[in-house]
Image (spheres, helix red, strand yellow):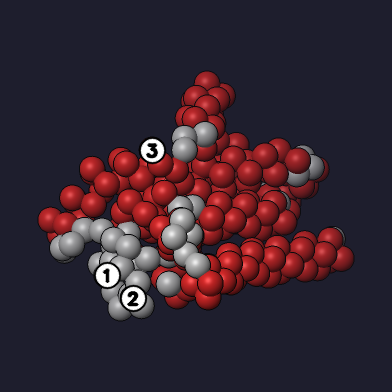
């Protein structure tokens, strides 16, 4: 279950991060103001939707689609896709907000040097907002780590090490939610250890992000 949890969270982060970054860049540098305002509003709306709503939609739409491709449908892949949809708005909105805080002097200096628009964005503005990007990834990872309802509804709830994207899995948050009501003794203690394991992963990721931020500040 620990391996399945790490696999589904990493898969979602790896899928959501580039999409979120491109979404933020589109809103900030390319989209006309009305379209950017509408897109940000859409992302904010998606960020406010509870996980159970995503889980229900995944159960009735995504899982049957995957089942047509490769049974049983409830799988690691379904969990990754739904978690990606869940954390994408968080990553995109956080990175977009950090791009706003980057000084425009970078843009002006790049224009003086004759850099292209894309070269300025990718080579200057994105590295300048790098700390904000790690913050966005950390926030998305934190939400994905604690998500329970989506994992309960679309992953199959079978405690096994996944060998492919189509294998059913059970994550630690889902296991805690399923078994805490009737757990006693060592069983209950094991569930608390699972919670501590999740907290440890969150703490380690936070420390890594803090170290990266400190190194970046020292470099600047």
Going by the image, does 116 lie left or right of 104?
left
The residue located at (62%, 68%) in the rendering is 196
Q: Name the residue under label 2.
A: 160
N-terminal of the pair, mark 3 or mark 1, is: 3
Cα separation between marks 3 and 1: 23 Å
Q: Mark 1 points at which residue?
A: 167
Q: Position of residue 60 (x, y in %)?
A: 23, 43
Asked which quadrant contains residue 76, the reply is bottom left
Is residue 129 shown to the viewer in this render?
yes
Total tally of numbered discs in the picture: 3
Q: Mark 3 points at which residue?
A: 53
Q: Position of residue 192 (x, y in %)?
A: 58, 67
Q: Where is residue 23 in the image (x, y as percent from the top left)?
A: 50, 43
Q: 134 or 34: nearer the eye?
A: 134
| SS assignment at label 1 | loop
> Do the CB atoms of the residues marked 1 and 2 lie less than 8 Å apart?
yes
Going by the image, does 49 lie left or right of 107?
left
């Amino acid at each position: 279950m620990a391996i399945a949890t790490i696999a589904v969270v990493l898969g979602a982060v790896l899928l959501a991060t580039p999409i979120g970054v491109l979404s933020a860049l589109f809103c900030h540098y390319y989209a006309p103001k009305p379209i950017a305002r509408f897109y940000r509003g859409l992302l904010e709306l998606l960020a406010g939707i509870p996980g159970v709503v995503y889980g229900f939609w995944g159960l009735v739409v995504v899982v049957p689609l995957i089942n047509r491709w490769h049974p049983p449908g409830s799988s690691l892949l379904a969990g990754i896709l739904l978690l990606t949809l869940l954390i994408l708005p968080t990553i995109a909105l956080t990175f977009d907000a950090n791009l706003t805080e980057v000084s425009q002097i970078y843009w002006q200096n790049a224009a003086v040097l004759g850099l292209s628009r894309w070269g300025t964005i990718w080579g200057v503005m994105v590295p300048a907002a790098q700390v904000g990007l790690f913050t966005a990834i950390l926030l998305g990872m934190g939400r994905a780590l604690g998500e329970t309802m989506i994992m309960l509804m679309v992953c199959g709830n079978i405690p096994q090490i996944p060998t492919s994207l189509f294998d059913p899995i059970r994550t630690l948050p889902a296991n805690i939610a399923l078994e805490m009501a009737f757990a006693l003794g060592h069983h209950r203690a094991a569930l608390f250890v699972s919670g501590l394991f999740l907290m440890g992963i969150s703490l380690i990721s936070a420390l890594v992000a803090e170290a990266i931020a400190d190194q970046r500040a020292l470099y600047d």
